[in-house]
Image (cartoon, rainbow, N blue to C red):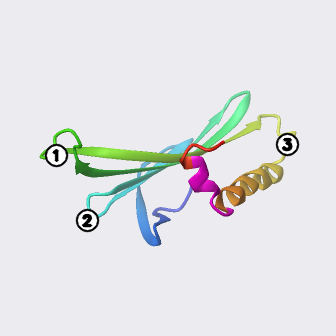
Amino acid sequence: MLADPQSITYNAVAKSLVAISRGTDGSVYQVTDGSGQTFRLTVSHQYKSRNRTSVRLDFSKVVADLLVPANSIVASASAYLVIDQPAMKNITDTETGYLVTSLKDWLATGTNISKVISGET
């Protein structure tokens, strides 16, 4: 199991997410800070004909309703990565690790994250 708590950095600010659910094939970590922002990290695994690992970070906050500004609503966004491998392991964990690192590095290069978020393909 991963350590409890898990640490993420959001906009240069470290957040400590404590485990709120832990199981054999998945765990959920969460923190709600003083400003009403909530961060939730979910790590899960599925073992079938293909092994899938999902790492997901959810963010939510209370904001003014654009239609009725006197009301508040919860707005949210998510980012996640799914790692898909053959169950027979004819592609090694090391090779898959290289693949994940390559994708992470590509996203971090220049403005690729901003371009993809804004709809470029």
In the rendered structure, does residue 112 fall within the stretch colored magenta? yes
Picture coordinates of residue 97, whole percent (x, y): 76, 54
Q: Residues within 10 Å of mark 2 (few under 14, many from 20)?
A: few
Q: Amino acid at mark 1?
A: Pro
Q: Residues within 10 Å of mark 1 (few under 14, many from 20)?
A: few
Range covered by the magenta-colored residues: 109-116
Residue 67 visible to an observer of this rendering: yes
Residue 55 visible to an observer of this rendering: no
- Residue, far left: 70
Secondary-structure class at tag 1: loop
Q: Which residue bears the numbered disc 2?
A: 34
Mark number displayed over residue 91: 3
Q: Are marks 2 and 3 in contact (CB under 8 Å)?
A: no
Left or right? Give the position of 48 relative to 55.
right
Judged by depth in the image, the label closer to the viewer, 2 or 3, is 2
Of mark 3 and mark 1, the one earlier in the sequence is 1
Q: Amino acid at mark 2?
A: Gly
Of mark 2 and mark 3, the one earlier in the sequence is 2
Residue at 71% over, 57% down: 106
Q: Alpha-carbon distance for marks 2 and 3?
A: 44 Å
In the rendered structure, does residue 82 fall within the stretch colored magenta? no
Q: In the depicted view, which residue is nearer to us: 21 or 41?
A: 41
Picture coordinates of residue 8, whole percent (x, y): 49, 64
Residue at 42% over, 66% down: 16
Q: Which residue bears the numbered disc 1?
A: 69
